[in-house]
């Protein structure tokens, strides 16, 4: 019998296609559209989807009912650039080394967008974060179009006719003013002095509002919906990859008044709370530095409640785009991934922002994959996974083969995790790495130098997750150990009383040492852009031989 489905692009579908009709074959052989939606600075445990006592995310809750939800998705990095770089390359920060605001991905390292474009996809980005959209760090490589909203003169997609304000925006974007402003904006990622000046309260409202540091969530989501509608109506057979970055939950916090009335009901009548938030929104240095002056209970509550308001507001804004995808029928052939690059500290563990620590409030992030063809509906994955594997999950769905350091796309795809923990690839580590952002440390040297040693901010931090255990290391020394299932807020460091955990601690110490050895070896190959050759590094050669990776 002649196979009615001669064209295949995914091994997992071969067994399915044998018994389908010709019409089903055409549908199943069509590569899916892919939407990667990154909710920047979004804590997982502040979502009702993850058990939060407030109903902050009803839209995402509804999506999750027909999707696979990962309860312990761990970001490979603690801030925007390294975490995005890992999702865009499938590599850990130690390997890709894009860990500073002035760093750039090696040209030899292909990005997700580059691979998808070569695989026949149209690649489009809608980005509200200037660290991704403005800085020259290689994260925009491979996009056919990249619309950046986190800048003085936002890029505006041309869909249909330009009229009124959109026409003016396009003139400014394509004109001389854009060419002047962009190089200046990029300097803030390189110059400690400019960054220090930017943290002064007098300048924060300027770059936060006028220069649109947080972009424009409402406008970008409207543009995304319009773009999806335009692409759908154009009858194009070319599959689409859309990267989206939303910044609503990043400081400074300015939810609309009606949203604040609902989520922070005391705010309107509490003058002290209003004054605190207004002042805090201009003290950007406090957003990144460790807590040298602890917040009072009520100050902490104001930040928590306002953050929740931003979470709920952004969730509500997503409703229109999700509704369009569903009503237009596009959701049936779209892989929709909702994830975060990192969370946020509000004084937890004496840290603010997302610069120097790797506690759960920073590295445990939401991850939802809606693509029932490969990810079961209403499935919860309860064991830890790394979000660097978003890269492999997308390429597998697109039917694109890619091999890196001995692992294929299918071996590291999150579809294996959705199938059960016993399907995880051998030797896979779930690790978060916190390389200290040097530009922030430079600002600290000019502001509170005494905090540098007190909080050990110059030191490298790593955490490894396995089952319910988490081991944290600072400067390659074991520092803390937690059972995150019973203690997700990480309040009880079990190293203080390790009875019963000695073997587990020792196992994880060995595993994180193995991880570092392997990643450092991979880094050598990434930088050179060639096949790994350890002959000139006998120490790594011996360590890899001891681990069994080479003979």
Image (tube, grey):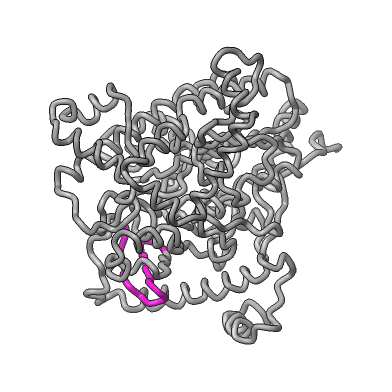
Residue 177 quadrant: top right
- Asked whether, in this view, residue 1 is left or right of residue 134, the answer is right
Q: Predominant secondary structure in magenta? A: strand
Q: Residue at x 70, y 46 (%)?
A: 114
Q: Is residue 469 above or below residue 364?
A: below
Residue lying at 20% horizontally and 33% vertically, measured from the top left = 274
Residue 354: image x %, image y %?
38, 53
Q: Is residue 489 left or right of residue 214?
A: left
Q: Is residue 246 left or right of residue 160?
A: left
Residue 350 in view: yes
In percent of width and height, residue 480 lies at 31, 70
Task: Decide which of 422, 191 is in the foreground and name it.
Answer: 191
The N terminus is located in which quarter? top right
Span of residues in magenta: 465-487
User: Which residue is more in the foreground, 481 or 504?
Assistant: 481
Q: Is residue 325 above or below residue 287?
A: above
Residue 519 image point, x, y percent: 57, 69
- Residue drawn at x 54%, y 37% is 127
Whether 17 is among the magenta residues is: no
Residue 101, percent across and down? 51, 55
The foreground one among 478 and 287 is 287
């Amino acid at each position: 019998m002649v196979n009615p489905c001669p064209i295949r692009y995914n091994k997992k579908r071969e067994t399915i296609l044998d018994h389908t009709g010709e019409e089903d074959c055409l549908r199943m052989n069509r590569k899916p559209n892919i939407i990667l939606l990154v909710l920047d600075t979004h804590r997982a445990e502040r979502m009702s989807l993850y058990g939060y006592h407030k109903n902050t995310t009803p839209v995402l809750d509804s999506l999750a009912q027909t999707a696979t939800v990962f309860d312990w998705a761990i970001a490979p990095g603690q801030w925007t650039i390294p975490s995005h770089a890992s999702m865009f390359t499938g590599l850990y920060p130690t390997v890709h080394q894009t860990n500073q605001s002035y760093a750039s991905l090696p040209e030899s390292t292909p990005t997700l967008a580059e691979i998808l474009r070569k695989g026949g996809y149209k690649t489009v980005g809608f980005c509200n974060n200037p660290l991704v959209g403005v800085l020259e760090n290689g994260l925009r490589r491979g996009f056919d179009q990249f619309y950046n909203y986190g800048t003085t003169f936002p890029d505006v997609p041309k869909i249909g006719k330009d009229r009124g304000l959109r026409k003016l925006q396009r003139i400014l974007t394509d004109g001389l003013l854009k060419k002047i402003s962009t190089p200046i904006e990029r300097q803030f990622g390189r110059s400690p002095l400019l960054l220090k000046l930017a943290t002064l309260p007098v300048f924060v409202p300027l770059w936060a509002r006028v220069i649109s540091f947080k972009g424009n969530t409402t406008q970008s989501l409207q543009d995304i919906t319009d773009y999806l509608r335009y692409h759908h109506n154009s009858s194009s057979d070319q599959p689409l990859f859309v990267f989206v970055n939303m910044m609503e939950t990043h400081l400074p916090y300015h939810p609309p008044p009606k949203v604040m009335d609902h989520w922070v009901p005391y705010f309107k009548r509490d003058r002290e709370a209003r004054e605190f938030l207004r002042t805090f929104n201009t003290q950007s240095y406090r957003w990144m530095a460790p807590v040298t002056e602890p917040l009072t209970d009520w100050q902490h509550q104001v930040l928590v409640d306002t953050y929740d308001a931003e979470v709920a507001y952004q969730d509500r804004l997503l409703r229109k785009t999700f509704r369009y995808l569903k009503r237009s029928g596009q959701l049936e052939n779209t892989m929709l991934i909702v994830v975060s690059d990192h969370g946020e500290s509000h004084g937890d563990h004496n840290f603010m922002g997302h610069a120097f620590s790797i506690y759960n409030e920073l590295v445990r992030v939401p991850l939802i994959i809606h693509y029932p063809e490969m990810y079961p509906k209403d499935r919860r994955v309860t064991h830890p996974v790394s979000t660097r594997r978003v890269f492999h999950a997308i390429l597998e769905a697109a039917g694109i083969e890619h091999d890196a350091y001995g692992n294929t796309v299918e071996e590291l795809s999150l579809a294996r995790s959705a199938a059960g923990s016993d399907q995880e690839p051998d030797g896979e580590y779930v690790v978060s790495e916190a390389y200290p952002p040097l530009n922030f440390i430079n600002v600290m040297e000019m502001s509170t130098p005494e905090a540098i040693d007190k909080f050990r901010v110059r030191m490298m931090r790593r955490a490894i997750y396995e089952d319910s255990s988490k081991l944290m290391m600072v400067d390659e020394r074991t520092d803390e150990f937690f059972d995150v299932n019973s203690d997700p807020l990480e309040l009880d460091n079990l190293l203080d009383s390790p009875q019963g955990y000695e073997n587990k601690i020792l196992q994880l110490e060995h595993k994180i040492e193995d991880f570092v050895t392997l990643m450092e070896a991979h880094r050598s190959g990434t930088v050179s852009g060639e096949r790994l050759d350890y002959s000139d590094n006998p120490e790594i050669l011996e360590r890899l031989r001891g681990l069994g990776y080479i003979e």
